[in-house]
Image (spheres, rainbow, N blue to C red):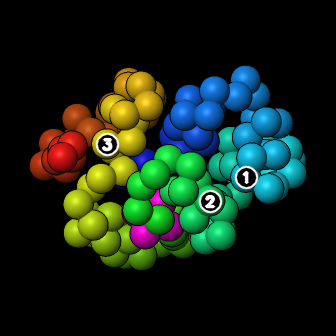
Amino acid sequence: MQTTNAFLDAVKAKTGVPSDYAIAKILGVTQQTVSRYRVGKDFLGDSTAIRVAGILEIDAAIVIACAHAERAKNEQEREVWEHIVKALGGLAASIFLAVGVAPLPSHEAQAAAQYPDNVYYVK
């Protein structure tokens, strides 16, 4: 499952913009909002997630489900949203191969190693 930061990095790579300020302009949010996304104080709202999905040319439901999972208040909610992402085909990972944002950050790599049955594929 992808994070808000991973989606922002993918938008940056896909559009070729140099900064989070430029990402904010593209997404129609403030620079402060992007900063809050980056530090985990805020997460993509549904409207912004839809714009991100449009830029990345992926199913908006995947981005929305990832955002909901990330901001879930408890583990049960998070597991439901993660299940929805998997049910949608786990296609969120494919965008990172498509735009060249390859390696997972170390905390995500550790989680992937800890939960090896999470399989993502690219069609």
Between marks 2 and 3, how big is the CA–CA gap? 18 Å
Left or right: residue 69 versus residue 111 is right
Judged from the image, the secondary structure of the residue bearing numbered disc 2 is helix
Q: Which residue is mark 2?
A: 51
Residue in front for this viewpoint, 82 or 58: 58
Q: Magenta segment: does it hold 64?
A: yes
Q: Which residue is mark 1?
A: 27
* x, y percent for residue 4: 57, 49
Give the crowd class for mark 1: few <14, some 14-19, many >=20 residues within 10 Å: some
Residue 73 position by quadrant: bottom right
Between marks 1 and 2, how big is the CA–CA gap? 7 Å
Residue in front for this viewpoint, 48 or 85: 48
In the displayed orientation, state which residue is furthest to the left.
117
Q: Which residue is mark 3?
A: 94
Q: Residue at x 52, y 62 (%)?
A: 67
* x, y percent for residue 77: 42, 76
Which amino acid, mark 1? Answer: Leu
Which amino acid, mark 2? Answer: Arg
* x, y percent for residue 100: 42, 25
| Magenta residue span | 61-65
Judged from the image, the secondary structure of the residue bearing numbered disc 1 is helix
Left or right: residue 49 versus residue 93 is right
Q: Earlier in the sequence, mark 1 or mark 3?
A: 1
Q: Residue at x 69, y 49 (%)?
A: 37
